[in-house]
Amino acid sequence: MSEKPDYILDATGLFCPEPVMLLHNQIRDMAVGETVRVLATDPSTERDIPRFCNFLGHELLEHNECDGNFRYLLRKQGDS
């Protein structure tokens, strides 16, 4: 599905909790319905980003990993 995101958040090289903290700040500045691609290298994002989406009600559109590089595509829902 790989749609072009409205924003790209590069969290490569950062470790928990920084990627999710940066994502939270990015989502706050976005309009409902906009998307953000998150690039990360921390394996804990495989747990943290889906939980972030579930807890705050955002839509996780894509999640994949290749050679230790994690990619996520999220769509902002609601107003959090």
Image (tube, grey):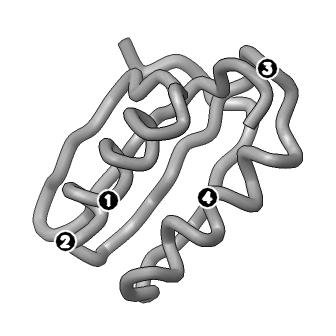
Residue for badge 2:
43
Disc 1 from disc 4: Cα separation:
11 Å
* Mark 2 or mark 1, earlier in chain: 2
Disc 1 from disc 3: Cα separation:
21 Å
Report the quarter where the C terminus lies: top right
Disc 3 from disc 4: Cα separation:
15 Å
Q: In the rendered structure, which amino acid carries the disc numbered 3?
A: Val
Foreground disc of the pair 3, 2:
3
Residue 54 or residue 42, whichever sits in front: 54
* Mark 2 or mark 4, earlier in chain: 4
Quadrant of the rendered image containing residue 2: top left
Residue at position x 40%, y 22% in the image: 61
Q: In the rendered structure, which amino acid carries the disc numbered 1?
A: Asp
* Mark 3 or mark 4, earlier in chain: 4
Disc 2 from disc 4: Cα separation:
16 Å
Provide the secondary structure element on which disc 3 rests: loop
Residue for badge 3:
32
